[in-house]
């Protein structure tokens, strides 16, 4: 009875409490490590080669028009000229065909879309169309001088890229035709249908009544796209693209994509092209640059040379280390077998377990020679 | 109750310094001395309250908060939190405030609860009833109400409530017996004497009539020292003055034995009692791991500050051009423009600090606390550490020191009750070469055991039988044992047989064991009556011997003798003593046989004594008597003369035989000590006991071996030579050998001749510890002493006062290597050392639970120490070491990309990751796997650790938290961070990572980096895990899955409570792009590769003992490993 009392405090004999849970002991055995290393190397090299090969199909043309567009750059230097028009055409020759889907990007250099205060300066409620007057978090572009709320408010919206770029194809010496470009599918589906919504109203100008345009804008938000009435307000694709802030000061944003009809079913044929640019966005004021990019893509994106090369180099390194490990392993094996001979000689075969040999052998460095 | 404390404090405060005097005067029974007597300064004394608690109800919150914020980490988080509150920062104050609040609250609750328990224990002690005399009547009061000057009555087996001057006892001779087991560990009975003039006061009225004052020194912690005097006033004559010494003082904590009741007057009460002064205040112990954690923390703090500084400076350099400071697209508000530059810069600096503050995560402290708290349950749950006899399991009083159990370098162990069971047992005796083992008791029938050497004749001849009986009589007579008084109460009428149940009392437990042993062999010592010793022989006849003289024991002679006169008129001298002191004085007897037996027994750790006798003719006795008398009355050099007289009398003896007594060692004590020594731990025995006894125990538990050369540093030796000479001689001896031989790292194993054991006693120690007068070279002896100790494989310190034990521990603790010390003991006398050592362990023993209560851990038996250190300690250490390193690593991975990102965002404090990720990274995405690892990991199995104590050396000296390792982990973190960041950067820069031409923004970039990071960091831990149970699988894969699910959910819904929706669909879009997948796989591979490679190479080329064991275990479990099979399997051996 008393004995039982004493034992009542005996801890439970469960595997968990006694730290005896069945477990797999992870061990780096030579075979395992070598196999895994070899496999990893193989995979990396394989992927690398595929990526490099696929990246060869990607074509990209970039035309920097910061200062080459008439004297627009100097004009935009002065903020007072913001409402003056300035445009130019930049001809260029495409020496090869660009096959498949062709995308047109604008690219900015030295524009910090990732500044802390800049990124905060937007109103989610406004952009969702919930309350067009909610400009709380938009400092310093909340309201205009006369106190009217700005729509879309904030520094990001205010600084939206507002150049228009039109690509012309010189069919022959006299005829230029406009390359058909699509202004749809530039944004994430979720942005277009959930994150950005126009305020509910019968027409757009009513929806934005009582607000004013951002100070740097030339047009109102509901007049951004005169060609396509659906592409206006907060749902304007260019606007949505701009509102997704870039990670680095040098960035590319999708401007339009090729509509593959008529001459352009297969892509852009080689030949002479011209960009007709209305130059509105001042970049020289922050010593930046801008350019327009035409690019094709493969399954792995536009330029997968980095991935491909890294994969290849990694694979090579892994293989190299595999061989080094193998060499070391073989060296050790030799030492082991010498130890075995020694043991067999002095103790007779079978007198000791292999592990004991290992122990003795490695504990006494003197035997290794 | 608190009012009482307050009053005490106020009183103490008001008394102040000026009234403090060297001595105190006590009015016995609070009676003023008659006028005309010397004027005394009245003093106030504390009441008899014992306080061990730290907080009171009122000061708990401020004091506890103050103590918590003294922790560097807590303070840091508080600062960060305040900064976040004050300035505009990229992260919300909630992210750091909430965890901090949580941590502080949990810790406060835990400490409050612990203190409440202490309050309860205190009040139980303070409220136990005490009898004292008031106006001639016996009054019962609570112990805490006792005041200095009160006259107290204590009954048998009660403990004294405070320090008392012994006034009288119910015995006529004014003596009482006391056991101080819970004070100094000696369980033997000590005799104390009442004051000469008051010993006649037997009743309450008598005592109440006493009119006296006592002057004595102010309380001091030395248990064995007391100086005072008592003035007894009579009505007519001048006061009688008597000196008081420690023999008149009864200490709190001691127990009255064998005396019905005593009266005493309280002189030291409450916290001023010698027992309380011997307690040290409980200070918070910090483990070595925590210390290195704090150091790492400071390093990271420096990194953090320098990061913030660099970024601030660069920010202003970068902004020096106005087009960058305020580009047209990012204009400042009016308020911002007007801010002072210095203020702006400072705010920026703070903002950067906040941005990077995650590098020192609050969650690390939470995880460490949880790991310690939960991990300690494994100790209490351990079945192997449960003692079925007592029904006790291990107790964990503080879980802060778990990992310290894996770092112990010195163990200081108490002897009595810790190493031994505190239970002497007569083992055997050897008479003329015949061995008798009294293992069977059948009515006094002796069953001679013939397992001896060369005496298998089971029917000893008449001559030998006579010798045998003489031997037993000698044992019955030659001692100073007292029989417990119960027998007297029963009166002479009781039957002689009942004498067997009588209880013996002696200051030496060996003697009791001997007398009891002889009793089992047929001879029973009954009592000492009228100077006649009565023994009951085998035939149930009472024999009477007149006790003529006792030549008492002393440690120099190491023997004692009695001279008795038998009923037939023959005079015998019986002598009993250590073999070394008996053999030279023997002229007859089977010396060689007995010697060999004695040596054999000594090797087995038995305490041996030799017995000899001689018959004295009356003339000889006359001569001896005169010698003794002359010596006893000598006024000068009495001791010396007595010794000379003894020397002359105790010679020409006839050897009878030898005895062997065993102080039963605790089960497996020797085995445990051996294992601990193999593990590289030095074991010291600290005991209040005699040197001989202690040394025998040390032999028995294999602390000293046969080959151990003993060095003595004792009072005796110091008396012969000066301390200086002794120390230098010893150090020369020790250093000569260690110099000639390069120190073997496995010295614990080596059984070569250079194996020294040091014995030191308390007096010698205090000489060493005492600062020297010349001052210039103080501490010189200490260094020398430490040097000697370092070279000894075992050290035995005997005759130690409790505080001296603590002193020794302190001495080692603060020696230049700063080793980790562990103290283990079971009695109240060990408390101070338990509190002093890095880890204090209490053995839940017989002598109360004081040690267990004050310890950090308590275990039922000494043997449990082995598993506690070698298995649990080892596990705790490797677990927490990985935990600490991993936490720093994963936060470097976390924050370094953030730092790099500042270079690309104009140093504008833009965060790379979303707030949710910032908050949850440490709290949920990466917290559980490491917590689980730190609870479950077993790099080698329990059995292997227990079998192979040398593995303990692998982690000695904080091996896994050395700078090298720390720097490696940090660099690994930086490397991984570089891979994540620049890998993602090059993927993003100028390239489209989708196949539909759409571009990703900065949040996608951050999410990509974050995803790679979470996977890498978790997989790194998975690679470090050796012990994969289903829980590990569940948690590791589960937390990765959780991350993915959370991200899907976080980005899948427009969260109504958020003012921004920047993460909306970011994660899903990232996963929908093929190159992102490829990039994630690549970056994870690249960041894991170097660590795996390093691990595999190190294992192959420079394996540690642990890794070799892992390999061996694998080969044991995989195949039946024989040499034969080795030739068949070419490569199965692990890296």
Image (spheres, rainbow, N blue to C red):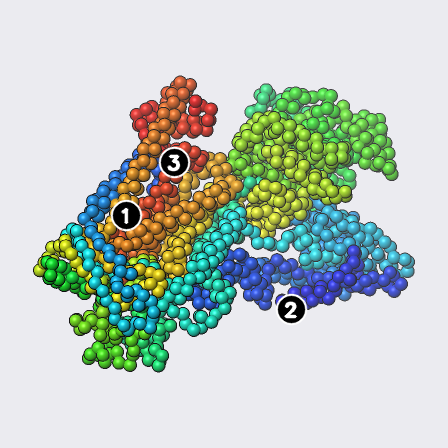
Do the residues at pointers 3 and 1 share their chain?
no
Badge 3 element: helix
Query: Quick check: can you spot residue A181?
Result: yes
Residue at the right extreme, as displayed: B237
Q: Nearer the viewer, residue B291 or B582?
A: B291
Which residue does the image show at 57% across and 47% down from the upper left?
A: B838
Q: Tell me the mark number nearer the camera, choosing from 3 and 2.
A: 3
- Does B5 appear above or below B170? below
- Residue corresponding to mark 3: B1097
Mark positioned earlier in the residue sequence (3 or 2) = 2
For residue B3, the mark is 2
Mark 2, chain letter?
B
Q: CA distance from mark 2 to mark 1?
A: 77 Å
Mark 1, chain letter?
A
Residue B880 x, y percent position in the rendering:
46, 48
**Around disc 2, counting alpha carbons within 10 Å, would you say few (fewer than 14), some (14 to 19), or many (20 or more)?**
few
Query: Quick check: can you spot residue B187?
Result: no
Q: Is residue B29 left or right of residue A36?
A: right
Report which quarter residue B426 is drawn in.
top right
Q: Tell me the mark number nearer the camera, choosing from 2 and 1.
A: 1
- Residue corresponding to mark 1: A306
Q: Nearer the viewer, residue B384 or A41?
A: A41
**Around disc 1, counting alpha carbons within 10 Å, would you say few (fewer than 14), some (14 to 19), or many (20 or more)?**
some
Marks 2,1: beta carbons within 8 A: no
Marks 3,1: beta carbons within 8 A: no
For residue B736, the mark is none
Q: CA distance from mark 3 to mark 1?
A: 30 Å
Q: Nearer the viewer, residue B800 or B15?
A: B15
Which residue does the image show at 27% across and 44% down from the upper left?
A: A309
**Quarter of the image that includes the N terminus of chain B:** bottom right
């Amino acid at each position: 009875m008393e004995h039982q009392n004493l034992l009542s405090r005996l801890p439970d004999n469960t595997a968990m409490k006694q730290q005896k849970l069945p477990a797999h002991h992870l061990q780096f055995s030579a075979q395992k490590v070598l196999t895994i290393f070899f496999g990893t190397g193989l995979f990396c090299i394989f992927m690398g080669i595929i990526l490099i090969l696929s990246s060869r199909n990607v074509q990209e043309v970039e035309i920097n028009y910061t200062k080459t567009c008439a004297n627009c750059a100097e004009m935009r230097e002065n903020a007072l000229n913001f409402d003056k028009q300035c445009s130019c055409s930049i001809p260029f020759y495409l020496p090869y065909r660009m096959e498949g889907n062709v995308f047109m990007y604008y690219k900015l250099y030295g524009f910090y879309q990732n500044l802390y205060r800049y990124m905060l300066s937007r109103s989610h409620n406004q952009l969702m169309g919930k309350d067009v007057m909610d400009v709380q978090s938009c400092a310093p572009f909340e309201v205009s001088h006369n106190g009217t709320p700005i729509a879309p408010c904030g520094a990001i919206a205010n600084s939206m890229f507002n150049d228009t770029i039109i690509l012309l194809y010189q069919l022959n010496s006299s005829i230029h035709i406009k390359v058909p470009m699509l202004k749809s599918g530039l944004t994430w589906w979720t942005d277009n249908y959930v994150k950005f919504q126009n305020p509910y109203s019968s027409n757009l100008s009513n929806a934005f009544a009582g607000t004013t345009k951002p100070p740097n804008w030339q047009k109102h938000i509901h007049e951004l796209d005169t060609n396509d009435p659906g592409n206006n307000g907060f749902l304007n694709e260019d606007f949505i693209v701009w509102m997704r802030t870039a990670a680095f000061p040098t960035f590319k944003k999708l401007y339009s994509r090729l509509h593959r009809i008529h001459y352009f079913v297969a892509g852009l044929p080689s030949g002479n092209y011209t960009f007709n640019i209305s130059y509105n966005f001042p970049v020289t004021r922050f010593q930046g640059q801008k350019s327009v990019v035409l690019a094709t893509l493969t399954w792995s994106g536009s330029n997968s040379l980095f991935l491909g090369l890294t994969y290849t180099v990694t694979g090579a390194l892994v293989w190299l280390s595999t061989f080094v490990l193998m060499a070391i392993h073989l060296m050790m094996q030799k030492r082991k077998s010498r130890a075995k001979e020694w043991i067999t000689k002095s103790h007779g075969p079978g007198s000791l377990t292999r592990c004991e040999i290992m122990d003795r052998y490695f504990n006494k460095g003197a035997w290794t020679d | 109750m608190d009012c009482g404390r307050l009053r005490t404090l106020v009183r103490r405060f008001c008394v102040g310094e000026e009234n403090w005097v060297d001595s105190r005067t006590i009015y016995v029974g609070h009676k003023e001395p008659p006028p005309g007597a010397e004027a005394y300064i009245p003093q106030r004394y504390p009441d008899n309250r014992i306080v061990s608690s730290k907080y009171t109800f009122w000061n708990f919150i401020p004091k506890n908060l103050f103590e918590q914020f003294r922790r560097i980490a807590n303070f840091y988080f508080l600062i960060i939190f305040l900064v976040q509150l004050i300035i505009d920062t990229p992260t919300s104050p909630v992210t750091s405030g909430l965890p901090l609040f949580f941590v502080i609250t949990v810790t406060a609750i835990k400490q409050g609860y612990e203190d409440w328990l202490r309050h309860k224990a205190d009040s139980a002690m303070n409220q136990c009833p005490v009898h004292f005399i008031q106006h001639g009547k016996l009054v019962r009061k609570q112990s805490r109400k006792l005041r200095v000057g009160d006259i107290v009555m204590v009954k048998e087996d009660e403990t004294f409530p405070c320090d008392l001057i012994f006034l009288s006892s119910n015995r006529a001779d004014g003596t009482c017996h006391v056991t101080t087991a819970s004070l100094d560990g000696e369980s033997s009975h000590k005799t104390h004497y009442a004051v000469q003039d008051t010993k006649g006061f037997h009743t309450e009225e008598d005592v109440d009539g006493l009119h006296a004052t006592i002057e004595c020194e102010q309380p001091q912690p030395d248990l064995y020292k007391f100086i005072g005097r008592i003035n007894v006033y009579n009505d007519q004559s001048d006061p009688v003055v008597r000196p008081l010494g420690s023999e008149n003082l009864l200490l709190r904590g001691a127990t009255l034995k064998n005396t019905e009741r005593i009266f005493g007057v309280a002189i030291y009460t409450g916290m001023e009692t010698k027992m309380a002064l011997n307690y040290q205040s409980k200070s918070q112990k910090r483990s070595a791991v925590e210390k290195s954690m704090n150091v790492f923390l400071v390093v990271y703090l420096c990194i953090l500050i320098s990061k913030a500084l660099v970024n601030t400076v660069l920010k202003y350099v970068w902004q020096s051009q106005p087009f960058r400071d305020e580009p047209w697209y990012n204009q400042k508000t009016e308020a911002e423009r007007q801010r002072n530059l210095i203020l702006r810069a400072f705010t920026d600096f703070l903002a950067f600090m906040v941005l990077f503050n995650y590098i020192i995560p609050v969650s690390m402290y939470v995880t460490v606390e949880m790991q310690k708290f939960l991990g300690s349950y494994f100790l209490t749950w351990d079945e192997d550490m449960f003692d079925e006899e007592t029904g006790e399991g291990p107790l964990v009083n503080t879980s802060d020191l778990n990992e310290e159990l894996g770092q112990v370098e010195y163990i200081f162990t108490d002897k009595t009750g810790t190493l031994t069971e505190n239970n002497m047992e007569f083992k055997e005796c050897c008479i003329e070469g015949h061995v008798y083992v009294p293992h069977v008791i059948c009515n006094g029938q002796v069953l001679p055991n013939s397992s001896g050497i060369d005496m298998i004749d089971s029917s000893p001849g008449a001559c030998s039988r006579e010798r045998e009986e003489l031997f037993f009589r000698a044992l019955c007579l030659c001692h100073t044992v007292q029989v417990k008084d119960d027998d007297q109460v029963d009166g002479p009428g009781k039957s002689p047989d009942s004498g067997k149940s009588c209880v013996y009392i002696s200051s030496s437990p060996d003697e009791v064991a001997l007398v009891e042993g002889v009793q089992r062999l047929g001879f029973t010592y009954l009592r000492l009556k009228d100077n006649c010793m009565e023994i009951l022989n085998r035939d149930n006849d009472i024999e009477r011997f007149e006790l003529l003289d006792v030549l008492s024991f002393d440690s120099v002679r190491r023997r004692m003798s009695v001279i008795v006169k038998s009923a037939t008129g023959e005079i015998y001298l019986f002598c009993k003593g250590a073999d070394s002191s008996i053999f030279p004085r023997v002229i007859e007897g089977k010396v060689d046989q007995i010697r060999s037996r004695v040596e054999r027994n000594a090797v087995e750790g038995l305490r041996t004594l030799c017995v000899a006798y001689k018959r004295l003719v009356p003339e000889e006795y006359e001569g001896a008597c005169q010698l003794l008398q002359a010596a006893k009355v000598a006024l000068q050099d009495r001791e010396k003369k007595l010794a000379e007289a003894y020397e002359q009398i105790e010679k020409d003896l006839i050897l009878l035989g030898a005895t062997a007594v065993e102080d039963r060692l605790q089960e497996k004590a020797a085995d445990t000590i051996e294992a601990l020594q193999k593990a590289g731990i030095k074991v010291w025995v600290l005991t209040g006991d005699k040197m001989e006894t202690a040394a025998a125990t040390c032999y028995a538990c294999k602390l000293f071996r046969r080959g151990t050369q003993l060095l003595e540093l004792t009072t005796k030796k110091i008396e012969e030579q000066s301390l200086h000479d002794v120390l230098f001689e010893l150090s020369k001896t020790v250093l000569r050998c260690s110099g000639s031989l390069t120190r073997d790292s496995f010295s614990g194993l080596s059984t070569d001749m250079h194996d020294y054991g040091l014995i030191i006693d308390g007096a010698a120690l205090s000489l060493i510890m005492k600062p020297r007068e010349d001052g210039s070279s103080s501490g010189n002896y200490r260094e020398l002493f430490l040097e000697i100790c370092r070279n000894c494989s075992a050290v035995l310190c005997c005759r130690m006062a409790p505080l001296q034990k603590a002193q020794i521990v302190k001495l080692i603790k603060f020696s230049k290597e700063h080793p980790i010390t562990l103290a283990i003991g079971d009695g109240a006398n060990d408390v101070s050392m338990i509190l002093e050592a890095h880890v204090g362990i209490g053995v839940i023993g017989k002598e109360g639970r004081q040690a267990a209560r004050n310890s950090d851990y308590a275990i039922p038996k000494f043997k449990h120490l082995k598993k506690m250190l070698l298995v649990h300690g080892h596990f705790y250490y490797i677990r927490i070491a990985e935990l600490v390193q991993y936490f720093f690593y994963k936060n470097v991975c976390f924050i370094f990309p953030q730092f790099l990102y500042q270079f690309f965002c104009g140093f504008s404090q833009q965060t790379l990751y979303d707030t949710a990720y910032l908050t949850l990274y440490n709290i949920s995405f990466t917290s559980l796997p490491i917590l689980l690892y730190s609870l479950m990991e077993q790099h080698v199995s329990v059995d292997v650790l227990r079998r192979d104590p040398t593995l303990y050396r692998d982690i000695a000296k904080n091996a896994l938290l050395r700078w090298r390792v720390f720097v490696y982990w940090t660099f690994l973190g930086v490397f991984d961070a570089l891979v994540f960041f620049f890998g993602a950067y090059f993927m993003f820069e100028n390239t489209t990572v989708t196949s539909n031409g759409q571009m990703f923004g900065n949040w996608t970039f951050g999410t990509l980096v974050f995803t790679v990071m979470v996977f890498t960091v978790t997989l790194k831990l998975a690679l470090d895990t050796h012990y994969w149970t289903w829980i590990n699988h569940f948690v590791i894969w589960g937390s990765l899955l959780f991350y993915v699910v959370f991200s899907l959910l976080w980005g899948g819904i427009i969260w109504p409570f958020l003012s921004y929706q920047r993460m909306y669909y970011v994660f899903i879009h990232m996963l929908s792009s093929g190159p992102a997948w490829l990039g994630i796989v690549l970056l994870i591979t690249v960041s894991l590769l170097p660590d795996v490679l390093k691990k595999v190479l190190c294992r192959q080329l420079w394996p540690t003992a642990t890794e070799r064991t892992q390999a061996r275990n694998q080969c044991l479990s995989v195949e039946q490993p024989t040499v034969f099979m080795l030739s068949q399997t070419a490569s199965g051996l692990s890296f």
